[in-house]
Every structure is written in structure tokens, then in C-alpha cells.
Amino acid sequence: MKNLIVTVGGAGQNVLHYYTQLYLTGAVELPFKALVIDADESVASLRFMSEFFPLAGVLAANEIPSIALERVQPANSAGEVRNSLGYYRAAEANSYEHPAQAFFCAESLGQQVANGLFGRPCLSAVMALQRTMESLERLRIEPGMTITVVCSCVGGTGAGLAIQVLDWLTRRAAAVGGGTSVRLVLLGQFFRIRDEAIQRQDSRSKSHRLLFAKMLEFSVPRLHSFAFIEDPIMDDRPKTESQAKNLPWPQPAEPYWRATNALDFLLHDRIREQKNIFEEKEVDLSSYAGRLDHPSAQTKRALGVARVGTFVEKEVFKRIFAEVIPHRTWGTDLTGFIRQVLRLMEAGGGKASDHRALGEVGQAEMRKLWAGGESYGLRMLFPPGDNSICGVGEISGAAWPTIQIDRLDAAKFLNVQSAGKMLAATVMFSLLRSGGK
């Protein structure tokens, strides 16, 4: 896979949240690998998708994305920052137990590590750097790969770690060769701060932005290109962003949509040459604005969600298994795909009774993956308004994969529960990817 996305901090995760939606519903064509780096817990949607993609990927005909999550907490992540710096015991009043504490004010040292690092990039640069470097060492960088980092330069984790991440990636890209390049989607002060826990954040943000830009210019000379996105400033970021539950879609002029467009542009741009002058590395808004057509993407998303919602609500799996000649209603591609799964179960030594149960199990697993219940479900990835019901033709007309049975491990399908779950995930993936086509 030639496209690698590395997000650092919460802003990068939110851009990936929307980019994943666009891929799932067919607005983004090519698959990608993603590495999510954060000192805080990953957003719920990316945690879900990191498990969903492997489920759907077993039966999918083509290569599909993968998302790896790395929470780069310090080894001692309990209590206040002062307890974690240098892994020493807490300092007594007005004294320092570890030299690193001398570089931070009392307010920073008293911050609770479990609550994230807020707008303090120097803390993440000290406390999470080692874990970040370890996560990068596990990456497989291939010749010809396009690597795009997504982060903010005014927060805590992204502003504190992205320069080191970019430096490591550009050095590795140069060593690998073969046209491997590193790009950057950089969000500035793209929202108004209203969190009282982040004291003096407005003045801090200006300082962080300037410091980051200077470090980027002088510390990452091998950077191929970057897009800087800041205006128009959002009134505030939703408090529920980390839950990623039915978040509204950004409008075309909003920072998250522009960042998503910039990400797609930078991942696929093969024309722009690398510049030596820092200012010339920036990609102008006109180069990527509108790359992903907003109305068309909404149409694809709405139809894809309608296909899956209909499949779940109308219990299509059960109907297919109950009908004598199901292909007359549901088409030969869908019913043929299900027959291939049954053959895999037979090859794995499955029982005939398991085959009969596949419809019931597949339907139950699909409802669970879609609705979620107490846990996250795929329906939560999308905005709340897409709830229409579609016709049989929209379902049967989806692009269904053709399974190459001899290339799969039939033993994975011996258990009807696991077979049903993989079948359900692949059907959902196919219904969404065909949306709007």
C-alpha cells in the first residue's frame, strides 16, 4: 500500500475520522495505512475501524485500509505531570526531584496526566517522545510510498511531537529512496478556545504556532510540501469529538473539510516537485479546495448508509436463506458471494447445521456491528440524518467481491460465529463502498 497517513494528536484524528468516512462511502478511491499517535485515548470511531477493517478485509476482493493505534503515554501515567517526569517520586514543595521539572511552571507540573496534555507541547515532547519513536520504528516504509502527517501546531501532543515525527519520517524516506516522500497537513488556530482548563491559551497558541513554523523550516528540510489550514475559525470544537458519535459533517469552507481535501491531494499529488525554499513548499488552498466534491460525497454517504440500514432493518440475510430461489430477488452476485462463504465453511470442516445457521448469525452480527448498543457501532460514524430506506435493486446492485477460496484459510470459517461476523462486516463494507455509484 503506497499511501501512509500518520496523525499526531487529537486534531489529526478528527481529520482521519472524516477521511475514513469518505473512503468507506466511495468518495475516496484508494486505500491507505494509518498510524494514530496520541498521548490521550484514540477517538471511538478510529478504535472501532481499527477492528472493523481487518474483519472486512478477510473476504474483500481488494486491499482495504488498516489503522494502527498508538497511545504514547509515559510509563508512569498516574497522577500529576511532576510524578511522571523522569519517573521520579513527586517533588517536595519548592524543590525539584528531577532536572526536567525545572523547565516547567507549577501549573504545568500539577496537571493531571490522565486528562491529556492540553495546550502544552513541551510536556508531550518530554513525556511521550520515547514511546512515539518506538511506534515509528514498527512502521514499514516502502519505496515510492507517500507519507502524509496530519496534526495541529497549537495543541499539546501534535505541536510537541510532530516535528520529531516528521524528522524521523523524512530521514527514513531518504534512506529508503525510490521516490518516497513526506508531506504535512498542518492545522493552526482553527477553533476558538473556550475551555477554562487551558489558561492563557490564546497567547500560548500564537507562540506555539510561531515556534512550530520555525522548527519545521529549520529542522525538517526534507519535507516535500505542506498545507496550512486555519481560517475560517470554528466557533468551538464539539465536546463530544472524542466520542465520535454521529458528528455532523463539516461544511465545505470549514477547517476539517479543507484539511480532508488537503490530505487527499497530498497523498496523490505526483506532479509537484520538492522545493528547497520553505515558503515555496506550501500548497495553496486553490490547489486542493473542492478536490472532494461535497454534494457528491453527501449523496454517496446517504445512499451507502441507506443500503446498510435497509439490509439490517429488513433482515435481508434471513430472507436470502429462507427463499427457495434467492438470486431472482437479490441477484447472482450477492447470492453467489454468500455461496462462496458456505463453501469456505465446508472446506474448513463446518457442520451442515452451521450452514443453516449462517443467515441468523450473520444477521445478528450485522445488527450488532451497525447499531453497536452499549459499544460503538458503524452507524455512529455517520451523521444522524441519513436514515432512508432503499429498494432491492440498490442492494443487489452493489459491487460484491469474488472470493478466491484457494487463497484463504478455510479454518477461520469453521466456527459459524466468526464466519458470520466476517460475512456481516464484508457485506456492510461492500454496501457502503458502492454507495452513490
Image (cartoon, rainbow, N blue to C red):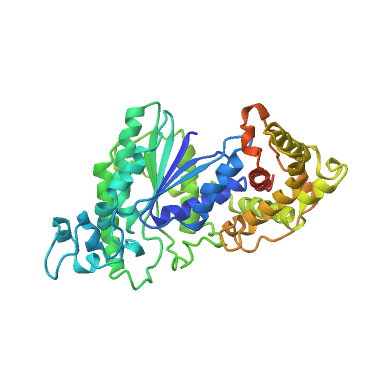
Q: Is residue 274 visible to the viewer in this orientation of the structure?
A: yes
Instruction: Please state if 357 lies on the left or on the right of 66 as rendered.
Output: right
Q: Which residue lies furthest to the left in this view?
A: 95
Residue 329, x across and y down, in percent: 85, 45
Instruction: Please state if 160 lies on the left or on the right of 244 as rendered.
Output: left
Marker count (numbered): 0
54 or 175, which is in the foreground? 54
Which residue does the image show at 76% across and 54% down from the upper left?
A: 315
Residue 373, x across and y down, in percent: 61, 62
Which residue does the image show at 36% across and 27% down from the upper left?
A: 177
157 or 87, which is in the foreground? 87
* Image quadrant in which you'd find residue 134: top left
Which residue does the image show at 13% across and 56% down from the upper left?
A: 99
Instruction: Please state if 276 lies on the left or on the right of 42 as rendered.
Output: left
Q: Which residue lies furthest to the bottom in this view?
A: 196
277 or 397, which is in the foreground? 397
429 or 385, which is in the foreground? 429
Q: Is residue 59 visible to the viewer in this orientation of the structure?
A: no
Quarter of the image with the C terminus in it: top right
Residue 29, x across and y down, in percent: 58, 40
Which residue does the image show at 72% across and 55% down from the upper left?
A: 312
Q: Work out whether 246 lies above or below 138.
A: below
Residue 69, x across and y down, in percent: 43, 48
Q: Work out whether 124 lies above or below 437.
A: below
